[in-house]
Image (tube, rainbow, N blue to C red):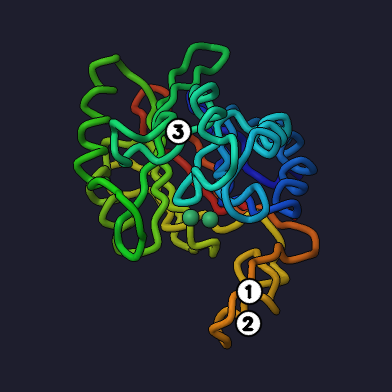
Amino acid sequence: MAKYPKKQSGSLRVIFLGDVVGRPGREVVTRRLRELKASSSADLAIVNGENAAGGAGIDAGTALEIKSAGADVVTLGDHAFQRKGVVDFLQKNSDWCIRPYNLPEATTPGKGHCVWRSKDGVIVHIMNFMGRVFMGGSIDCPFRGIDKLLGEISSDGPALTICDMHAEATSEKWAMGRHTDGRLSLLVGTHTHVQTSDAQILPGGTGFITDLGMTGSQTGVIGMDSSVALRRFLSPTPAPYQIAEGEGIAHGIIADLDRESGKTVWIELLREE
Ligand SMILES: [Fe+2]
Ligand SMILES: [Fe+2]
């Protein structure tokens, strides 16, 4: 028996995987995503890849590895610009690999929004935002930012809309859920690397989860080797992160988005080894 129910008629099925952490994360994406898309009849796969390269950032090689494993779109987060060469890569591949939208407009390379089209013509706007609570850096207001972007998108005609809200605070992600309910098709939180159990459809029809969780090894501390992570908490001396060993697990959601209404009609937690 198939693990997931049959796709709801008239809907587009989306898989969204949480932060891919290092090699164990990339390997589980390569091992499972294409087969999972086929067995669940998913149309679109989106993957947060902000920790894909060595646990912090992404580069051309790791981004293309995730893409060739079946990801249609890759979103990022606070580590977006950590790796060498990524600026050039994001400039050239902004149609499928996006960084947070609400970064200083004049000085941030790449794009925070892209458009994906299904073979039968469904248009999906995918966007990446970053929260400001407990997050460092020059981040513009995500609430005003999404209002601006949704305003621009709505003038382009009917489409589905999916947002990755990369943020630390559960409250900020829930506030964004309330703020965009009925305006976004699907809003997923990323960044904490711990999957929350609150996948649901909000009253206005927006599919929502506070955090997708992590795609990586669960033997350490949110994807990183335990001994190094502990040393960083227990001692003031520097201890560079290392990736936790062991096979990766993919965490995320799978959801059906109604093509006509633009609302989520079904959403479920995803956990695949
Ligand atoms: Fe992050
Ligand atoms: Fe992350």
Q: Residue at x 70, y 47 (%)?
A: 3
Give how far apart the Cα atoms at labels 1 and 3 are: 44 Å
- Give the answer, above or below, for where 216 lies relative to 38: below
Return the residue found at the far bottom.
Answer: 234
Q: Pinpoint residue 31: horizontal percent, then vertical percent.
A: 80, 43
Q: Nearer the viewer, mark 1 or mark 3?
A: 1
**Amino acid type assigned to the residue bearing label 1 in the image:** Ala
Q: Pinpoint residue 82: horizontal percent, then vertical percent.
A: 53, 47
**Amino acid type assigned to the residue bearing label 3 in the image:** Leu
Identify the residue position indicated by label 2 in the image: 231
Instruction: Give yes or no for contact between labels 2 and 1 (Cβ–Cβ under 8 Å).
Output: yes
Mark 2 secondary-structure assignment: helix
Q: Residue at x 43, y 44 (%)?
A: 164
- Give the answer, above or below, for where 66 lies relative to 235: above
Circle 1 Cα neighbour tier, 10 Å, few/some/many (<14 / 14–19 / ≥20): some
Circle 2 Cα neighbour tier, 10 Å, few/some/many (<14 / 14–19 / ≥20): some
Is ligand 2 less than 8 Å from the beta carbon at label 1?
no
Identify the residue position indicated by label 3 in the image: 257
Could you say which is closer to the camera, residue 55 or residue 178?
Answer: 55
Q: Which mark is residue 99?
A: none
